Structures are given as C-alpha cells and as structure tokens.
Amino acid sequence: MPRWLAHTIVAALFAGAIAAAFWRAGYAWNWSAVWDYRQKFLQGWLVTVALSIAALAASIAVGAAAAALLRSGRPLLEATGRTYVELIRGTPLLVQLLIGFYVVASAVGIENRYVVGVAVLALFSGAYMAEIFRGGLDAIPRAQLDSARAIGLTPWQALRLVVLPQAVRIVLPAVAGQLVSLVKDSSLLSVIAISEFTLAAQEVNAFTYSTLESYLPLAIGYLALTLPLSALARWLERRLRYDAG
Amino acid sequence: MNLVIAGLVQRFPVAAAAGRQAGLATVLDHLDLVTGEIGALVLVGPSGGGKSTLLRILAGLDVPTSGRVAFDGVPLPRDEASLRAYRRTVGTVFQAYNLFPHLSALDNLLLPLIHVHGLTRAAALTRVRGPLDRFQLADHAHKRPAELSGGQKQRIAILRALVVQPRRLFLDEPTSALDPEMRGEVLEMIGELRGEGTQFVLVTHEMAFARQVADAVAFVADGRVIAHGPAAAFFDHPAEPRVRAFLERSLAP
C-alpha cells in the first residue's frame, strides 16, 4: 500500500471517530456566531506564527549556548549551565512567564510584552534544546576529533566541518519534537495578555458562549503549524541520512 | 628521517575502579630511542606496551608528560598551535580508519586539501585523481564510508593522509581491524609507497610485513624500547629473550 493511501485511510478513520463522538454528545452547534470573529482568529494565528518563529530561532541559539556551557569542562560554567537547565525544566512555564513578566522584565525595564514572551519561551525551550544538543555532541566518537586534529583542522574547523554536520543529523528528530512543543507552548503567552491565537479563542468563547466552536479552530490552527514543521524535519532527516561507518 | 627520543614519559590519569585507586598510569617510562638515518621505522611489541601511545606523541596528537622527541634535529613542540602546524606536515592513519562518515570518500580526501592546505576545489580534484586511479579507488570515490569495504576505507584513509604530501606517515596498526584478504590490499599499498621512498613510522603486529618494509625495528614493552636495530638483525638474531619469545609466538602458524 502506498504511504499516502495509508495516511489518508487512517486520517479518515480518526476524523470519523471524532465526528461520531461529537454526534453522540448531541452538541448544538452554533458556527455563525463564531464565524463573525474570523478576523480575530486570523490575527491571533498570525501573531502565534510570528511569536513561534522568533522563539524557535532564539531557542536554538540559547540551547546552543547552554550546551556549550554544559560541555565547557570548566566547573563554574558547567554549574551555570546545569543550574539553568534544571531550574527551567523543573518548573512550569506558567510560573516562568509570570515571574519573567511581572518581576524580571519590570526590574530591567522591558515593557514590550511580546519581547518578554518570546524571551521566556526561548529560555524555556532552550533548556530542552541544550540537553538535546549536548547528547548529540556526546554521540560523536572521540576518534572523529582525533582524525580532525590529525589532518590539521583548527578546533573551530573541526566543529564546523566534522562535528556539527554529524551532530545535526543525530539531534534533528528530537529538535523537531521540541519545536512542535514550542509552538503549542506559545499558547500560554495568553496569560500575560499577548493577543495570540489562544487568547483570540478565549475571547471569542467569552463573547459567543460557543465553547467548542471557539476551540476547534484553535486545534486546526496549531496543526496547520506543527504538521508542516514535522514534515520539514522528516524531509531533512532523509536528505541528511548516511550510515555511521 | 632521523629520530631521537630521550627520556620520554607519558602518564595518564586513571579513574578509580575495583581493586584500583585513582591516580596516574605510567604508559611510557623513560623511553629512549636513536634510529640514525632511516626511511621506515616499525614499532612492534605486546599490546598495552606503549606502541600506540608513542605513535600518538610522534604524530603530534598527544603531548608527553616529559622527555624530548626530535625528527631530523627538530624538536617536537609542546604548545597546541605549533603542534597543529606540525601535524599539517605529516600524515596519520588510524586502526579504525576514522573517515568522516558524513562525507563521500572523495570529500574525505578533499577536506584537508581545501580547508587546511588552501587548495581550490579544482586544484584539489586534480591532486587526488591520480592517486585514486592508481589504487583502484576511483570507482568508489563517490561512496560514503559506510558503503566501502574495510580495506577500501583504510586505503582511502591512507590516501587522505598522503595527498597533502606529508614529510612522513604515522600508521597505527592499519590492518588490525581488517579481514585477512583485505589486509593484503592495504599492506600491498603501504609496501608500494615504501618502495617509492615514502617515510613512515608503523605500528603493526604483521611480523612478516614488518621485516619486509622496515629499515629499523623497535620492540616496545613496559613503556620502554627493550630492543631495536636493523630489521634483518632484529628478526634473525634477536638477542633479548623477551623479543625472541615474542617473535616465536608471533611467527608461529
């Protein structure tokens, strides 16, 4: 069976099961009230797209920097990286957002809530990225570095030409998973009143009392972002494939 | 080459394990060697005796704890920048090939030429074409290492060390990871290079081959050179009882 056919059949079965569940619940649909707010949904979705892209890029940079700390071999730097990673991974994003916005941002005088939101998201996701990157770098055999040194590469060249191309291939699936999480985690930015996609759905729900009609588009809107991201990752993975040896 | 080694010591920190305290392991213990003017030096001896550790120091990959090494009167430096400059003038081949798995065989050869020695891609391609043809590797040049046999991988690794036109090669048990039939093709290649005057230091367990290519042989055990001398004398009239016993075991069918 071709893969596209398998995907279509499974998607149809899932859609059917969900539709059946809604039908059995006997929900009284009221799409027209929600439809009036379509502009609001679209604006919120676009804000989510922009926030996600900014946080994606920043979280990769933060993760790379933190991974460098974790692998620096210097106790003070390693402790700094370790503390950051464990603090972030051990606490809820919600708390981080509230502290970041009401305490840290006001202490340093940043008033733009979008900047704060992206920064907190990037710091949050960066902690997970750091561990993914560290694992990828650790997976490169020492012999590869020996080889790089033997031919006379500088440490920076060895990183760029030998280590990173191999590490990227190793971390790609995990990074893609983390980026998908990041897109969904951006929904929490609604708590610091950033008018993104989730806040739009919450407001529409408050105006129309049509809960499911407000939130179903939300699910579809996030899928529209995360599915292409996963597909891109799988494509890259295939393109970079080679066997160790 | 004229190699002089005096009082070479290499100690490594070792972690604590069952029945052993953490501390320093002495792998090379005041090793001395003066070769005179030779083309090929072969290091033999029992596993764990310090051959590979010595070779890594000679190749500029590791810095010894103390002692002096000089090739043709030029001492090996101790700082990483000077060592890197030194490594660019020599070639090293490892037991496990250590090719870059994400690059084709061809790109493995081009990488040092382009990024270390500053050749353009076109000039680098011209440089590698002849050697690839000569060693019947041209048809495999576009394969990734995983698609090559062990013998092909090791021959590509030798070419990677060779195409930069090094002063000498360091080969660390280049055939130990290979099946017997592939060993032959790699040894043949090294023998051919020797015939053309390529200078090298080789660590090997292939005694027959060592005898054939070596100008001088050094027997390394317990971190020292126990015996050394011209190949013929070393193999035919071993004076040291340890060397004699080792050779008898190695040459036994």
Image (cartoon, coloured by chain):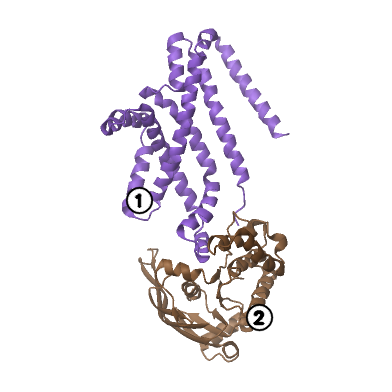
The image position of residue B211, as x and y in percent, is 62, 84
Dot label at residue B195 = 2
The image position of residue A141, as x and y in percent, is 51, 57
Q: Which chain is brown?
A: B
Give the quarter of the image for residue B82: bottom left
Frontmost residue, A112 versus A179: A112
Q: Amino acid at mark 1?
A: Glu
Pointer 1 chain: A
Query: Residue at position x 54%, y 51% from top?
Result: A165
Looking at this view, name the residue that lies furthest to the left.
A107
Classify the position of the C terminus of chain B by image quarter.
bottom right
Q: Which chain is purple?
A: A
Frontmost residue, B112 versus B236: B112
Dot label at residue A78 = 1
Give the quarter of the image for residue B79: bottom left
Frontmost residue, A13 versus B119: B119
